[in-house]
Image (tube, helix red, strand yellow):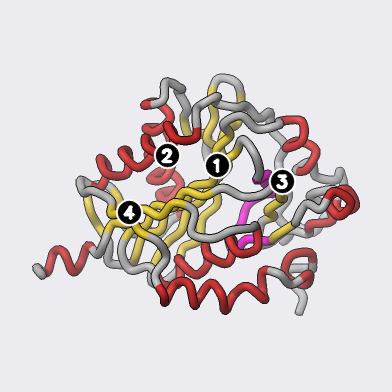
Amino acid sequence: MSDSVEADGPCRFILEGARGAHANLAMEEALLRENRGMILRVWTNERSVVVGRAQLPRYETDLDYCAAAGIPVVRRITAGGTVYHGPGNVNWSLFVGRRFSSGTVKYVWGVTELFGMAAELVNRASARCGVETWLEEPNRIVSGGGKVSGMAGYIAKDGVLCHGTFLLTADLEEAKRLTEPAKVRLERRYVRSRPMKMANTGIELSSFIASLREAAAGKTGRELETDTPNERERNAAESLLEKYRSPDWNLGDPFEG
């Protein structure tokens, strides 16, 4: 193997990789920890509410409604606001290892650069499907109708993660209800969600998946290998499941404990 290939690492495409909101968020952290190349992951979730790492969930969604409806509320490792997962929405994740650099996809030190790099892939994929979208800084992808994707990122020593939602044909009223923050003032250290008009793209799921994969191949200049999480990644995700099922992690104060 040449030095350049060793430095680049593998380009992998993972479709799904876990089942259920808690397992999916555990897998996100596991892949961030274990990845040394590039991974494009596309995945779907049950109807659920995913809150940012520095949020107080009781002020970002209706916990009583979620409990009565059996809707999981799960905290992710990345910052940002609360988002809706469920039917009509697909999630995408871009993982880039510290030593990876191929085409325009590489490890970056700043969140602005990270959001820009990921948004390029999503916007190119959307355009391939006939829908124009663009990045509205810092972390929203919008169309003429409104917000279609919210992004969040994490920059670690050995790799970066940028992931987001993408609205296809979701129930926007339900999405709004589940992500409407309470109108109360909190300390500045707690991140608040910022309501914005949402819009569906109307793109078919299979078309978006294929187009996003093609966009990633074009930006890296390499074909993506169809793959599944390996044993090391599955073990890491399994070890994180207890955390992601814990009410303390999901519903507690992120600055306590």
- Magenta segment main secondary structure: loop
The residue to which callout 4 is attached is 226
Label of residue 90 in the image: 1
Label 3 is placed on what type of residue?
A: Ser
Q: CA distance from mark 1 to mark 3?
A: 20 Å
Q: Secondary structure at mark 4?
A: strand
Q: Is residue 185 visible?
A: no
Give me the residue at 81% from left, 49% from top. Answer: 61
As for residue 216 lying within the magenta part, the answer is: no
The residue to which callout 2 is attached is 209
Q: Which residues are magenta?
A: 75-85
Residue 138's x, y, as percent? 53, 42
Give me the residue at 66% from left, 56% from top. Answer: 52
**First in residue order: circle 1 vs circle 3:** 1
Image quarter of residue 75: bottom right
Q: Is residue 121 visible?
A: yes
Q: CA distance from mark 1 to mark 4?
A: 18 Å
Above-or-below relation of 98 to 152:
below
Mark 1 or 3, closer to the camera: 1
For residue 175, side relative to residue 204 (left or right) = right
Give me the residue at 54% from left, 30% from top. Answer: 142
Q: Secondary structure at mark 2?
A: helix
As for residue 78 lying within the magenta part, the answer is: yes
The residue to which callout 3 is attached is 193
Q: Secondary structure at mark 1?
A: strand
Badge 3: few (under 14), some or many (20 or more) residues near its Cα, within 10 Å? many
**First in residue order: circle 3 vs circle 2:** 3
Q: Contact, CB < 8 Å: mark 1 with mark 2?
A: yes
Label 2 is placed on what type of residue?
A: Ile
**First in residue order: circle 2 vs circle 4:** 2
